[in-house]
Image (cartoon, rainbow, N blue to C red):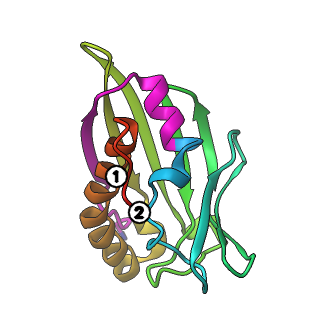
């Protein structure tokens, strides 16, 4: 009997000094203000990041040469509550159009005392990529998400992401 491969999800939690609605809005509609311009899949510099505000919408980047590169697709859209995005990126950091081998990112926006939000991020399904590629991607995003979420928190607080 063969056992199915499982790779543990990456989970990160951060308390942000804003309401869930504001945090969701900045995460989605404001992604271009905080997502690092250095984090790109394109061949030329990143000009703009976009998340289309509906299930099935694209998460994509626009580059200096005019190219649009898909990062993933919106799988769940519940403003102020929950967002699920496909992470359609290979372990070699190239676009991966095959959804069956892509991981996904779920973000929950939970109200806590005094107008604050506990953001809970879970990046999961690395096993879809295969054992070696999935373990590599998991390791890399485990170290990357804390820095990315700090940029989000700074932007939500009004300090700008500095990128």
Quadrant in the picture for residue 148: bottom left
Residue 73 in view: no
Contact between marks 2 and 1 (CB within 8 A): the answer is yes
| x and y, in percent, of residue 150 in the image | 28, 50
Q: Is residue 132 left or right of residue 93?
A: left
| x and y, in percent, of residue 80 in the image | 50, 25
Q: Residue furthest top?
A: 114
Q: Say if the magenta span includes residue 133.
A: no
Viewport quadrant of the C terminus? bottom left
**Is 160 in front, or is 109?**
160
What crowding class fits label 1: few (fewer than 14 Cα within 10 Å), some (14-19), or many (20 or more)? many
Q: Is residue 35 left or right of residue 144?
A: right
**Which of the labelled discs sits on residue 163, or is there none?**
2
Quadrant in the picture for residue 78: top right
Question: Gap between marks 2 and 1, in whole Å?
Answer: 9 Å
Query: Who's the residue at 29% across and 28% down the image?
Result: 17
> Nearer the observer, disc 2 or disc 1?
2
Magenta residues, start to end: 3-27
Q: Would you name the residue on which mark 1 appears? A: 151
Vertical comparison of 159 with 144: above or below: above
Query: Who's the residue at 32% across and 42% down the image?
Result: 153
Query: Who's the residue at 27% across and 71% down the image?
Result: 139
């Amino acid at each position: 009997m063969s056992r199915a491969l499982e790779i543990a999800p990456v989970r990160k939690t951060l308390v942000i000094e804003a309401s869930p609605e504001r945090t969701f809005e900045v995460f989605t509609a404001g992604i271009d203000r905080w997502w690092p311009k250095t984090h790109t899949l394109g061949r030329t510099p990143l000009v703009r990041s976009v998340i289309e505000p509906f299930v099935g919408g694209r998460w994509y980047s626009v580059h200096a040469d005019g190219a649009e590169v898909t990062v993933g697709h919106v799988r769940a859209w519940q403003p102020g509550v929950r967002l699920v995005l496909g992470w359609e990126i290979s372990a070699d950091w190239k676009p991966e159009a095959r959804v069956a081998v892509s991981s996904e990112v779920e973000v929950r926006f939970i109200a806590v005392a005094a107008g604050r939000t506990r953001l809970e991020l879970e990046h999961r399904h690395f096993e879809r990529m295969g054992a070696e590629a999935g373990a590599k991607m998991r390791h890399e995003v485990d170290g990357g998400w804390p820095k990315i979420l700090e940029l989000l928190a700074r932007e939500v607080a009004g300090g700008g992401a500095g990128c």
